[in-house]
Image: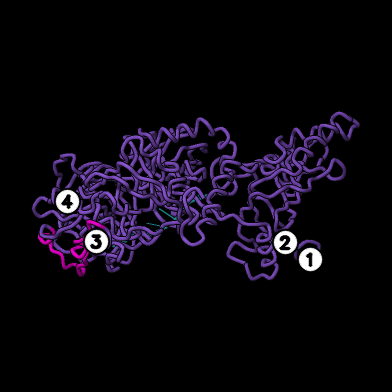
Amino acid sequence: MSLTGGCVPGLLSGELVPQAGAPCPVLQVLQTLPARPGAGEGWALVLSDGEHHLRALLAEGLHASLPGMGAQAQHSIVELQDWAPPAEVRGQPCVSVRALAPLGFAQGVIGNPRSYQPSWGPAPAPLPTPEHAAMPGHGSSNTSPLQQQPYGALAPQDNMARSGPVPQANAQAAGITPIARLGPHTQHWRVRARVTGKSDVRHFTNARGEGQCFSVELVDREGGEVKATFFGAAVDKFFNLLAPQGVFEISGGSVKPGNPRFTRHAVDITLDERGTVRAAEDDGSIPGVQFDFVPLSSLAELAEGTSVDVAAVVVSALPPTTITTRTGASRMRHAVMLVDESGCTCRLTLWGAQAEANVGIGAGTVLFVRNARITEFNGLRGLDSTDTGIVEAEPSGQRAMGLRKLFEERGEDLARQGLAAAGRGGPRRMLAECAAEGATLLTGLAEGPAGPAGRALTVSPATVTRLPGVEGRPPFYMACDAEVPAAEGRPRPCKRKATASGRGWCCPAGHQCATASPRYSFQVKLADPTAELWAGLFDEEARELLGVPAAELSALWESQEAGDLQAGARLQALLRAAAYRRVSVRLRSRRDVWEGRERVRVTAAACSRVDLVSEAFEMLAGVRQACAAGALCAAGA
DNA sequence: CCCCCCCC
């Protein structure tokens, strides 16, 4: 079983029609999405023939023929059994599917499917495959609209004469260049586009002196997207004019290849004061903001810095804070934890204007985020808002409703894992890998700028096989309550080990306090099928494991010391309940010197009970990968 | 021509 290579152009041109007795086109589901993000009418699919992809609308009720409309259907292989000729939906040709059947699953995306629109890209257009030629209705495949043009060879007027899967009903107004046809050296272009994102003005200093710029994200009626950046005097001329959601004709700038580090598009536009921008009539033919959602589960596989769109619900949020940047500027920051239907959680940090515009978001808020950047902190993947991105809070539609339902059903559960969630967003490791990381540290080879510390690795599940007992050293210490200035925000407690001194407490930092607070600190033994490892747990992680705060346990401990047998029994019960518990832990190895000898200590940066639902999703993904050994497995196998 | 920085 393989995909019907080359059938996408046939489907979009209307040349490929359902025919009794003919083989059905076989396609891969790249994405499932509401037909109109935010408007909630039925479902659409992005389907791929391995070379190109198209949007397909599903007839009512048809989504039930797929194994699931969330993460489950992604990458599945389907057979199109019946469909209507292509029609234009919001400026995009779209095939309406009347009947389809699932055939199986594949591991990841097959081939390198690209947009069906004629493109100038450097890679040669895929040629029709033999299968393609053999498909009924494909007799004209040698007139593929995807033949290449050299860079810059395409003058705007050529566009009109060129056949292409963009229906001629889309014929451009005179002199308008489709964004999709902007090549890295195209000159004399004019685009008519909607502003879907707009940055603030950025001031900078470089070799040429002081400068300023701002950027807008644009989409045109064919769905082509590009970013335009205005420099110098063009900022004063056009910043106020270019209102978000407005439609404008823009020309007089230069087009250059997009640097994938800085843009999600193939080319970038830059304009100076010689550029022109004028407001154009908004006749509704240009789509609004287009989201291209990816599941949070996919973030682990994407490169850091990649720009993505996500649809998710907030399960917990820290209060927004204002931080001072290295350059002394002040900037609002709002970190929230997201979950989506893939079952994965992920941090999202909103910055600056995006944070200010959304200060009210919190647990239960559904967010559609466009153009979020994948970042990593302490080895944990997360998302940051970007200046031309979009954060849409509480969108309408079916997808948003699904997320609200997810929050209602599992929100409390997920919020408890909250910002301490271990395990999401990075590949999962086994304990043997953590042990190996520690061994490398002892060689000194792994020493990075952060000193003798290894990477934080997520292990899930690991089983707690040894805990402190009720005899000997208590599993907590008395921490100094003195307030010390924090890097940002409110002062934090000193937390150093305090010793009783007269009526109060004192600590190695020289603080004298009336009170001190118990905090957990103890070692546990963890086991998984590959290794056993001792790891240190501090207050928050230990509390996750034991289920009670250190103050409660320390009170029992002291009563026990005073001979209270009942307290002793309760203490024992608490510790026993945590034994053999399965946890997700984030472990970091550090090298230090103790009693003259170098050693490696492992501490838990996060610890939470294994989340069975997330676990199930990941196991399901593993089963699929195993099934897919070659490429595919039979349906129902 | 910016520029992915900002914070835990």
Label 2 vs label 4, nearer the camera? 4
Chain letter for the purple part: A
Q: Residue furthest right?
A: A563
User: Looking at the image, which residue is at 59% across and 66% down?
Assistant: A448
- x, y percentage for residue A222? 21, 50
Distance from disc 4 to disc 3, alpha carbons, whole Å, reads 15 Å
Do the residues at discs 3 and 2 belong to one chain?
yes
Distance from disc 2 to disc 1, alpha carbons, whole Å, reads 10 Å
Residue placed under numbered mark 3 in the picture = A119
What residue type is disc 2 on? Val
What residue type is disc 1 on? Arg
What residue type is disc 4 on? Pro
**Residue A35 or A244: which is nearer the viewer?**
A35
Colour of the chain lettered B: cyan
Is A143 rendered above or below residue A636? below
Do the residues at discs 1 and 3 belong to one chain?
yes
- x, y percentage for residue A526? 73, 51
Asked if one can make out residue A332 in the rendered structure from this viewpoint, the answer is no
Residue placed under numbered mark 1 in the picture = A597
User: Looking at the image, which residue is at 17% across and 49% down?
Assistant: A192
Residues packed near mark 2 inside 10 Å, few (<14), some (14 to 19) or many (20 plus)? many
Q: Earlier in the sequence, mark 3 or mark 2?
A: 3
Q: Where on the picture, by quarter, is residue A436?
A: bottom right
Q: Which mark identifies residue A167? A: 4
